[in-house]
Amino acid sequence: METNTGSVLADPRWNTFTRQGFTCSCGDRHTGLFPIHLHHPVGWPGKDEYESDNTLRLDGDFLSANFCVVQGKFFAMRVRLPFLMRGAEPAAFMFTAWASLDRADFEAFIDAYKTGKLDPDTRVRARLVNRVGGFPDSFNLMGSAFQQPDGGPALLLIHGLQAGVNNNHQLMVEQRDGIGVDRMLELFAAYGHDMRSGIPLTN
């Protein structure tokens, strides 16, 4: 885990990354932050083939870009899982991951989503249902999902006592305290975007 707790604004690599970008192991040059998308929840039995959100079914199996139902018993939605860049807030390294909800909360979110009545003051208990690369096992971490009025995925904040896991889990700590450039580069590298050898030399 990163020990430097200073602002990324004091790190010359941050300015270079946000203005000029770094070359990447994927063959592209990346300028500034971009989200890492996790394709489906743990336990999804099918392929990564998305149906339309508009065809959502609450029985059987269903997967779209934003919603997932398994056997009519398990309900999940895509969420934003942010890690603030220390000192450069609101800039954040972002995963879009998946969180499971109780059926009643899931249906209430769907209704608000369809009617355009998403309210940032509305939050529900939600469970992270991905093993996020770059962290110890994050499956089943509990938190709160907050609706977002822009119509995008809810915001998931991991917090509180966690049953059966370390209550100083690295994901929880870094979401609370933010991350620096070294940690940002590690997280990108965990998903095939290794830019650590593509950083220009500075005087």
Image (cartoon, rainbow, N blue to C red):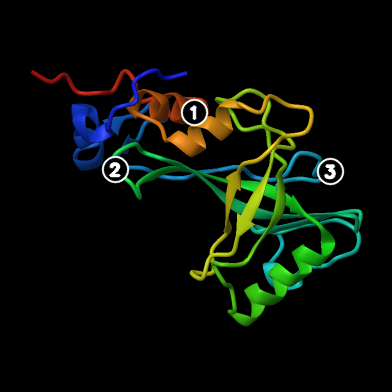
28 lies above or below 105: above
Residue sitting at the far bottom:
115
| Marks 2,3: beta carbons within 8 A | no
In terms of depth relative to the viewer, which is nearer, 72 or 177?
177
Residue 88's tag is 2
Residue sitting at the far front:
161
Which residue is at 59% across, 28% downward? 133
Q: Position of residue 84 (x, y in %)?
A: 41, 41
Q: Secondary structure at mark 2?
A: loop
The residue to which callout 1 is attached is: 192
Q: Position of residue 165 (x, y in %)?
A: 73, 26
| Marks 1,2: beta carbons within 8 A | no
Amino acid on which the number 3 mark rests in the picture: Pro
Residue 34 position by quadrant: top left
Q: Position of residue 125 (x, y in %)?
A: 72, 53
Q: CA distance from mark 1 to mark 2?
A: 25 Å
Q: Tag 2 or tag 1, which sits nearer the N-term?
A: 2
Q: Position of residue 85 (x, y in %)?
A: 36, 38
Which residue is at 62% across, 41% downward? 159
116 lies above or below 187: below
Amino acid on which the number 2 mark rests in the picture: Ala
Q: Secondary structure at mark 3?
A: loop
140 lies above or below 127: above
